[in-house]
């Protein structure tokens, strides 16, 4: 199951990071720090999301 979760993470992490960056830019934060923070939060949020999705798909 961990291999499935890691594979899903490689797809989910850039997606969540991209959504975070778009939200930061639409909110008016155009400097480097908020954009990097939003991308970092996206990568962190993708960890439990990938695990839960792998758990659902595996069973």
Image: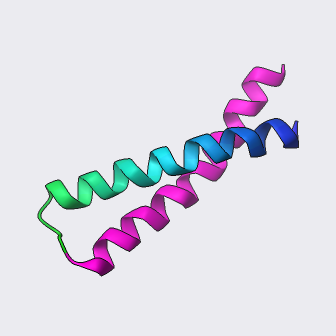
Q: Residue at 86% of width from left, 43% of height from top?
A: 2
Position of 32 compared to 56: left or right?
Answer: left
The x and y percentages for residue 52 are 69, 36
Residue drawn at x 67%, y 31% is: 53
Q: Residue at x 39, y 72 (%)?
A: 37
Q: Give the residue drawn at x 39%, y 51%.
A: 18
Is residue 35 covered in magenta? yes
User: Which stretch is magenta?
Assistant: 31-59
Q: Main secondary structure of the magenta part?
A: helix
Q: Would you place residue 17 above or below residue 49 in this image? A: below
> On the rendered structure, is 26 left or right of 3?
left
Count the labels in the image.
0
Question: Is residue 53 shown above or below 38?
Answer: above
Image quadrant occupied by the C terminus: top right
Vertical comparison of 40 with 46: above or below: below
Whole-percent x and y of residue 22? 27, 52
Image-quadrant location for residue 49: top right
Residue 19 image position (x, y, % from top left): 36, 47
- Residue 49 in the magenta stretch? The answer is yes
Image check: 26 left or right of 50? left
The residue most toward the left is 28
């Amino acid at each position: 199951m961990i291999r499935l979760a890691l594979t899903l993470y490689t797809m989910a992490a850039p997606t969540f990071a991209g959504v975070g960056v778009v939200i930061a830019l639409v909110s008016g934060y155009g400097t480097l720090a908020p954009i990097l923070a939003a991308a970092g939060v996206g990568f962190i949020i993708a960890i439990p999301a990938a695990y839960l999705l792998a758990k659902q798909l595996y069973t």
